[in-house]
Amino acid sequence: MQPPAPSPAPARATPTRATIADVAREAGVHASTVSRALNPATRGMVTAAVAQRVTEVADRLGWRPSAVAAGLRTRKSRTIGILVPDLINPIFPPILHAVETVLAAQGYVTLVANTDNDAARESLLIERMATHLVDGLILASAAAGTDALSLCARFGIPAVLINRRMPEGAGCAAVSAVTNDDTHGIGLAVDHLVALGHRRIAHLAGPQGVSTARDRRAGFLERMRHHGLAPVAVVDAAAYTRDAGRVAMTALLEGLVPTGPACTAVAVANDMLCLGVYDAMEAAGRRVADDISVTGFNDMPFVDRIHPALTTIRIQHDAMGRQAACILLAEMAEPGLARQSIRLVPELVIRASTAPPAKGP
Amino acid sequence: MQPPAPSPAPARATPTRATIADVAREAGVHASTVSRALNPATRGMVTAAVAQRVTEVADRLGWRPSAVAAGLRTRKSRTIGILVPDLINPIFPPILHAVETVLAAQGYVTLVANTDNDAARESLLIERMATHLVDGLILASAAAGTDALSLCARFGIPAVLINRRMPEGAGCAAVSAVTNDDTHGIGLAVDHLVALGHRRIAHLAGPQGVSTARDRRAGFLERMRHHGLAPVAVVDAAAYTRDAGRVAMTALLEGLVPTGPACTAVAVANDMLCLGVYDAMEAAGRRVADDISVTGFNDMPFVDRIHPALTTIRIQHDAMGRQAACILLAEMAEPGLARQSIRLVPELVIRASTAPPAKGP
DNA sequence: GTGGGCGGTGCAATCGATTGCAGATTTTTC
DNA sequence: GAAAAATCTGCAATCGATTGCACCGCCCAC
């Protein structure tokens, strides 16, 4: 553009972006001065007039900073990685949205990836993100038997867990976490069922590799004991998926798992599983609420519209995302900061999937 | 680790990653040789023995390439940006998942961001991604009156549209797109309703700024004409949200929009709107299917479990994501490639929200 | 036996921005 | 009015990997 060279079409072939050197030349100052003038943090180091002129030239030339070049020098990419076990599960998008909103406001960009609940894939993704020099990592995919945390430590990447904690043993104090009070939450479901008059209650648990499943299972048993009740049965689903829920519930209905007398209610570990529970009950000709009451967990979007509308435990998606993002920002700014573990309190949402037990035949 | 220096804790303070220079020194070769040995594409340029030795040393030192440094030199970040209007809408996660799977297999990492249907935010995000030197962009957020495409052109970033096209005028030929055949799809819904015996059919359209809404609206009108029917009413929702659907349907039910005789069926532009339609009908004491049949669009997850189960148009989430990713990869590799526009064909899924019209009173 | 060819390596420049240091200028202070 | 301090700006090194070019041997051929 500036040298009207005889070369045919540099304009089209290479829309070469202006660099800081171009701006410097045009503004008649040194590149370092341009850098200082354009960086809000260092603007104060140059004369107002110079800053003004440089800014104008930069605008005119359409200069955009290269995060890559800056990142190489500063070892900061202004990029945060987020690992999610399964984006298809509707509880994650709202959490992600909150995280992204907080981070975007601070000028960060987010690298989102699905682990598909696969530890190997998770490791690969963390390595790749390390390669891209992410400044921090938000892990919603924590599970037992995973290298995630040790990889982060090895690469020196600050991390915050969200929704799921690490298993107790695995140096859980080493990393901050924002989770729900799952124990308390499932207790609310038990209380509600008991209050309705249920005594024969089963638990459909999640995959025991993740903390939400373990905590809810333990919380269920504890709260049942508190009420002086013995659980009719506890079945573990293989994954937090609709199909795993269907399979587990089918097993429960067909007596394929050791159970006491037939249950009148089942507290399910998660809403996604509940969809499968509904499927299984429909297939078996049993009616939700009328025959067996069902409670979920998460209050994920749209479960108020399924039939019958699901009684569930509402978690604080938004607060969870926000808090995690804030903690991560704080720990990135000051790595020595004490780790914190925030437990958000969930609430019971009563809808139509729970009802008093049918009077005995 | 290797030099047991007296300095207190370099291990903790700076887990300095090994660089290519460290590997070179340790292996007794020049850095450029290391680079060639470690890059699969250039491995052939060095002796097998050297390659072997370098690889071993790199492993031993735990060397990881710096995508940032490489990116600065090569002007390729191996990063792809994806812009989504609203991640909360469950049709996007499956699409994203498909895109991510294809790209991850090629070693790319994805930068996902929500535009929240806000043009300014979209521009900001594109600029930020340009700053991070994304190699390509997948835009699911295309809407009229947006700078997205011109920004991409300015920054020289290849882009592929997905789900939504650009408005006809705006140089639509300049960019590839993978979309649904929305016109055909909504026609299937009309055909189905007509076959059930409906004659008084309304259309609840989406926000007319986006192509899916425009095409479905046009397709609806066209197909009605084909059947020799005049639409009872056409209402535009303000956005593709549950609440906008409720508002629009309420207006329709209360006769706030010019309508002919009361409708017996409404073809809705999208499943998310349908949730609001159900809300509005419930509030007005009208029964879905029994009083008014409802069809959706997208077959988003879980609409088979709402009550009554939604009759809708199924789109090919997975194929859409895959194709878009493949096209983008191809265009990145060969920028001169002719643009292509792929139109996927949707299918009708009949469930319980549609029924023959009630016999007149 | 000498020249050409070629495969393998090293050298050094490069990508674009940042930053410690030093020099130049101005301002403040006694 | 001179010395000291404060303020600006330029210089050059740096971050880590890539790559065009040159060079060095070695092999083969004539």
Image (spheres, coloured by chain):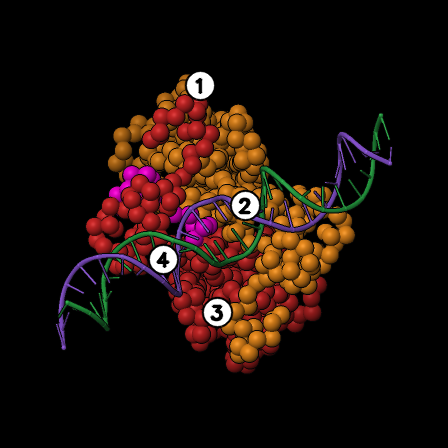
Chain colours: A orange, B red, C green, D purple
Q: Dot 2: what SS?
A: loop
Per the image, the residue denoted by label 3 is B177
Q: Residue at x 66, y 50 (%)?
A: A33
Which one is in front, B64 or A36? A36
Report the chain holding disc 4.
B
Vertical placement of A359 versus B135: above or below? above
Crowd around label 4: few <14 · some 14–19 · many ≥20 (10 Å): few
Are labels 2 and 4 on one chain?
no
* Spatial CA span between label 1 and label 3: 59 Å
x, y (%) of residue A155? Answer: 41, 37
Residues at marks 1 and 3 on the same chain: no
Mark 4 to mark 1 CA distance (whole Å): 54 Å
Q: In the image, what residue occupies the spot 26% across and 36% down? A: A256
Amino acid type of disc 2? Arg
The residues colored magenta run B55-70
**Disc 3/disc 2 C-alpha distance (Å):** 30 Å
Q: Which residue is mark 4?
A: B106
Camera-nearest label, 1 or 3:
3
Vertical side of B112 occupied by C27: above or below: above
Task: Assess whether residue B66 is covered by the magenta stretch.
Answer: yes
Question: Between B7 and A159, which is closer to the camera in this rendering?
Answer: B7
Residue type beneath disc 4: Gln
Q: Secondary structure at mark 3?
A: strand
Q: Nearer the viewer, mark 3 or mark 4?
A: 4
Q: CA distance from mark 2 to mark 4?
A: 24 Å
- x, y percentage for residue B167? 58, 72
Q: In the rendered structure, which amino acid carries the disc numbered 3?
A: Ala
Q: Residue A78 has which mark?
A: 2
Q: Secondary structure at mark 1?
A: helix
Residue in front for this viewpoint, A49 or A83: A49
Residue bearing mark 1: A226
Identified at 30% across, 47% down, the residue is B29
